[in-house]
Amino acid sequence: MTRSLWKAKAQKTNYPALKNNITVDVAIVGGGITGITSAYFLAKEGKKVAVLESHELAGGTTGDSTGNLYKMVDKRLHHIQSKWDEKTARAVAESRAAAVDLIENLVKEHEIKCDFKRVPWYLFSETNKKDETIEKEIITAKDYGIKADTLQELPIPVQVSSAIKVEGQAQFNPAAFVRGLAEKIDSENCHIYEHTNVHHIEKGEDHVLSTQHGTVTAKKVILATHSPKGIYPVQTAIYPHREYAIAAKLNSGDYPDGIYWDTEATFHTSMRTFKNHTGNYVLVLGGHHKVGQEDNYERFFEKLEQHARKLFDVAEIEYKWSAQHYKPADGLPYIGESSDDGIYFATGFSTDGLTYGVLSAMIFKDLLSGRENEWAELYKAKRFTPIKSAKNYIKENINVAKQYLKDLPGKAEAERFYEVGIGEGKVVEVDDEKWAVYKDETGQVHCHSAVCTHMDCIVDWNDAEKSWDCPCHGSRFEATGDVIEGPAFSPLDKRDVKSRKDS
């Protein structure tokens, strides 16, 4: 089983499930960093708020993230500048810096125990093949008044050709921050509900959100779910990827805190350290791929472990996990009101979601209070940028179209249930229909339609996390069919195994 270091080290939560019908000013779907920070601000504004989280707070992407905070972006500032312009790149850096400062202020104000600390950010190349990338980032950083020191070596055991260091970035435990901030929300104005899955939103002058045991009626809705729940045009402009992480406990070695990014590695992309009373850890993260488009998911964890053991004196791998992120077509996230009046979302964060999540809350606070926000236009959710988006848009939507071809006859992985091993899942062809068949450790067979309930794409079995993953728009389902994350509202449709003689 996979579990993140951050969830293991954060305080437990015990919020109730929604069991009645309520009316609020703002309903927030999702209890990660975007949802909880938005709830905190809006409750302070005097608005009646309800947060609906399908699992536990910070139980999704927030709790599975890196825990890094920085004004830089994963595609580099010089890429933003080349795709957009200098003004946009400067605004991205300034808005992200403001979000990191806000997190620090909230931690100090409320004494949130989340291991927040300021650390340097490093970008390095292992060979001279990517030295040009370092040079471009140095020039761009200088343009925006960001002090970047050039280095020829790092404080961790990695051989480098060229590197830069930017001071004043930060790290924390994101799950502990979110759960700590939730405790400080004005409880008179905001009620938090865990294990409350929203399975339908009836849109209208008043939006009605339906859950298993109650409804929430609200004038405004924030979909703080990474990809907005339901079907929205923006889903053709955000592309779901997964990234993997391990936390290795060290036998020896006491390395300085920092955020370490490799410019050229084909697999590992970043490293960081973490220390507490149980010992020293190094986190190694990487292995990007499109959701639901791999044959062997477990190999990503294996390669991360190999890399960690090559560089560090590793005692054991105590935690391993993965997280989802959505790459935007034009390089910037989409934050603001959707085409549906009164429904807002924040998506397309790429791997920069912790900082962008808090920035989204800052924007939502102003938009829902009728005030202007200096960054709202920059990240506007309804923007249309065909020239900046064209290359990625065409490439990624051709990829999605190819995934729909898996529904053709003969494209299943098996024809008989006995071909599915213990602890394994396979797509089985049953009377020209695709079934998602999982056989648990007791040998019990669980059968569902393999058709994703979002937009009818065929799901793929994830052997590392025992889940069914949709390769089109990133919805993920438990082995037993329930929704884990993504734009899908409903679980996979059940199928009756008893109707099959060959089971």
Image (spheres, helix red, strand yellow):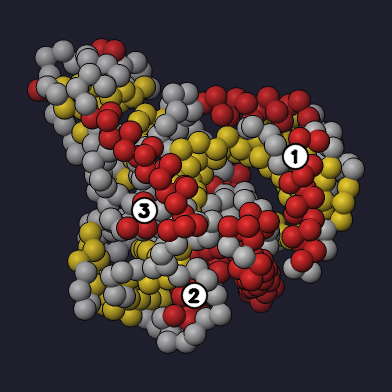
Residue pointed to by mark 1: 130
Q: Secondary structure at mark 2?
A: loop
Residue 469 lies in what quarter of the image? Answer: top left
Relative placement, left or right, of 472 versus 255 is: left
How much space separates mark 1 and mark 2, taking CA atoms?
34 Å
Who's the residue at 66% across and 35% down the image?
Answer: 268
Specify the amino acid type for callout 3. Gln
Specify the amino acid type for callout 1. Lys
Q: Is residue 163 above or below residue 145?
A: above
Q: Which of labels 1 and 3 is toward the front?
A: 1
Q: Secondary structure at mark 3?
A: helix
How much space separates mark 3 and mark 2, taking CA atoms?
20 Å
Who's the residue at 43% across and 58% down the image?
Answer: 386
* Residue 390 position in % (x across, y down): 44, 51
* Residue 69 position in % (x across, y down): 66, 59
Q: Which mark, by number, is residue 377? A: 2
User: Is residue 486 in view?
Assistant: yes
Label located before the other in sequence (1 or 3): 1
Q: Residues within 10 Å of mark 3 (few under 14, many from 20)?
A: many
Who's the residue at 28% across and 70% down the image?
Answer: 340
* Residue 130 position in % (x across, y down): 75, 39
Specify the amino acid type for callout 2. Glu
* Residue 215 position in % (x across, y down): 23, 67
Residue pointed to by mark 3: 235
Label located before the other in sequence (3 or 2): 3
In the foreground, 490 or 433? 433
